[in-house]
Image: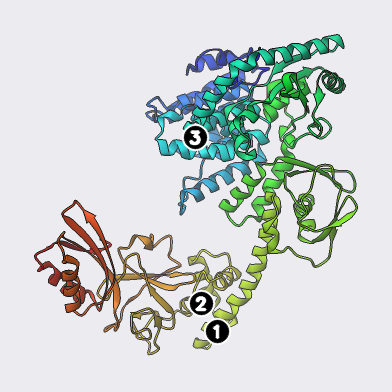
Amino acid sequence: MPADPLTVAPPGARAPESPLRAEPPRYLISDLCAYLESYLPPDQVREFYRAYLFGAEAHEGQKRKSGEPYIYHPVAVARILAEMRMDYKCLMAALLHDVIEDTDIAKAEVAADFGDDVAELVDGVSKLSQIDFDSRAEAQAASLQKMLLAMTRDIRVILIKLADRLHNMRTLDAMRPEACRRISRETLEIYAPIANRLGINWVRIELEELGFEHHWPWRRRIIHRAVRRTHGERVEMVGAVERALQEALAQEGIPGTVEGRRKHLYGIYRKMRDKHHPFEEVIDVSAFRVVVDRVDTCYRVLGVVHNLYKPVPGRFKDYIAIPKANGYQSLHTVLVGPQGVQIEVQIRTEDMQRMAESGIAAHWLYKSGEEANPAALAADWLQNLLEMQREAGNSVEFLENVKVDLFPGEVYVFTPKGRIITLKRGATVVDFAFAIHSDVGNTCVAARVDHRLVALNTVLRSGQRVEIINAPGAKPNASWLNFVTTGKARAGIRSYLKNLKQREALGLGKRLLNAELSVFDLDLDQLETPRLAAYLDEAKLAGLDALLVDIGLGNRLAALVARRLVGGELEELGSEPRNEAKNHPNRLAIRGTEGMVVSFARCCRPIPGDTIAAQFSPGRGIVVHRSECRNLGSPERKRDRRLAVEWASEPEGEFSTEIRVEIGNRRGALAVVASAIAEQGSNIETVVSCEKEGMTTALEFVILVRSRVHLAQIMRRLRHIPLVERIIRLPR
């Protein structure tokens, strides 16, 4: 009888061996050390215990959200890795994986006490907490980028992170609901797919189940109930098929085991969502696994099951001859079983079963003591990560490309020399070209698929032979981004287009800066080298080319840069700026912005008399804010865009500002207020009315004023209206 489909299976080959799974977790380092003695020498266990003492002292006084001592978490992470039979340095790094990030311990101190290998592993898992980012998404992307690149140097980094995430998901109930959803979404989008990409199936399943439970609790509950309703009805049929398969193997003298494969809830949900299948159709396919001793026996078993039940045409896959990208091997076939119910049978050897469950971790699990690098199993993917890192514009773009490659749905095609290339389902000729090499992708112009000439956007199918046609001088087209599907192709195309744009921006920036320098009878070649070097250092630019590219892209204003380079002071000149002062678009409003486009920020609506500051905004020119406006940001972070400005002595024109008037809820109240504003020589641009506490109405006006003095006169007049209870300027 198959096991309950609602349970998540740990690695099958290890479940009987691990006492740590046999009972509820007890956060005792003595129990963990006793387990480690079953496969590690005593001196390595002693080193592990020394790392525990170091970590416990570093985390002294810290607690998790659940209230338990923080050291419980590193011990639990180490326990998960111990079940994978990881080496002692990896286990030590697991105990110390948060000391750099969450305590005052530095990487150098970890390296001095436990060696460079452990320190590099700990640093690879640590987030980038010392750098300020503009958003949570950028911080998350940068930390993940750092971790994934560390993984390309040592695959154990990602194994520690997966164990860390697994324990965090097991204890997620202590977090706030919004944090649960955010962490669960990240787990489903990134960490579960990484576990799948590395072939660690049991970790993937548990991460998916826990992520599903916290991100979509109601959907999970509905599917859970539906599965329980159908489970009892299917037990008898599944048992009959198991017995039939086992008897067929016995008749042929083939030793092997047969078991029903568990369906986990997230897998059911994803198939319903992605393939638009109803629940009855998804749950109607029963899955069985046959494990035998040798590869040739797998093909004998295939013949046996095809004789027993009729195969469904087109539903056979040979992953033994052509393994999946994560090293998975098996024969898959779909049969028409009893009562017309479709059954899926997977046939594999014991070694293939271990790889299917543990993936890269199987290296340590079944070959402990060996020092070979298991990263060779994921060499192609790791190499792709490095190429995407080099070609990505920033960490967010890199993470987007990685996400694309984490959901492959494989297609297998052949080069003219017979090499197998694995691509994502839906991949095109251009994806294939970039999978061969970036230079091949950059210069491809057409292709032959099975000796027939095809267009570059042709979608490839498994088994096809693809030959790329290249032309010297050819270059990627931006339209390719509309149909490529792989992260490597997308990163390669974007990288080329970005470099092309930068080359064009370099020339434009040089022309713009020379034009502004000509006002001072100078050009770039005549600039003093020390002054230029000082400006580049202050602006944190790598060189003159970087400055010119910034100007060409519109990130810096050529006029401001020219003035800084010649050392000129900003003075009130006779030229008139272009600005957005109402009714007087060509009158001087701000000193120090002559000849520049000036706009006034709508977030704080500065008016003459306010203390002001400005910053350069690409595409908008100089944007003037009130000095206290939060959107200005810190001067240190935006120093190269901040500009000291002040109002002209007698600025002309009218400026928008916003006020809020709270008034008694009486008929004609709005007309009274509007009339009073008009009496003071101001026009109303907009008014918004909303109820407040039943008897009071809040009116928000955008009005035109000449200065703070004019605004004060208007507010003073409104306060004398008996119906007005409160009046304030917005934003406060």
Question: Where does residue 286 sit, x and y in percent of width and height?
Answer: 69, 23
Question: Where does residue 561 sit, x and y in percent of width and height?
Answer: 49, 75
Comparing labels 2 and 3, the label whose residue is closer to the camera: 3
Question: Residue 343 or 51: which is nearer the viewer?
Answer: 343
Q: Earlier in the sequence, mark 1 or mark 2?
A: 1
Give the total of numbered labels: 3
Relative to 207, is 713 above or below? Answer: below
Question: Where does residue 350 sit, x and y in percent of width and height?
Answer: 76, 19
Q: Tell me which amino acid carries mark 2.
A: Ala
Q: Which residue is mark 2?
A: 558
Assess whether mark 3 and mark 1 are in contact (beta carbons under 8 angstroms).
no
Picture quadrant of residue 154: top right
Q: Quadrant of the C terminus?
A: bottom left
Which mark is drawn over residue 216?
3
Q: Tell me which amino acid carries mark 1.
A: Ala
The answer for how far apart the CA atoms under marks 1 and 2 are is 9 Å
Assess whether mark 2 and mark 1 are in contact (beta carbons under 8 angstroms).
yes
Question: Residue 387 or 419: which is nearer the viewer?
Answer: 419
Residue at image point 80% right, 17% down: 292
Residue at image point 46% right, 54% down: 134
Residue 632 visible in the snapshot: yes
Residue at image point 46% right, 79% down: 563
The answer for how far apart the CA atoms under marks 2 and 3 are is 51 Å
Q: With 2 as the anchor, is 68 left or right in this view?
A: left
Relative to 613, is 135 above or below? Answer: above
Q: Tell me which amino acid carries mark 3.
A: Trp
> Element type at marker 3?
loop
The answer for how far apart the CA atoms under marks 1 and 3 are is 59 Å
Q: Residues within 10 Å of mark 3 (few under 14, many from 20)?
A: some
> Element type at marker 2?
helix
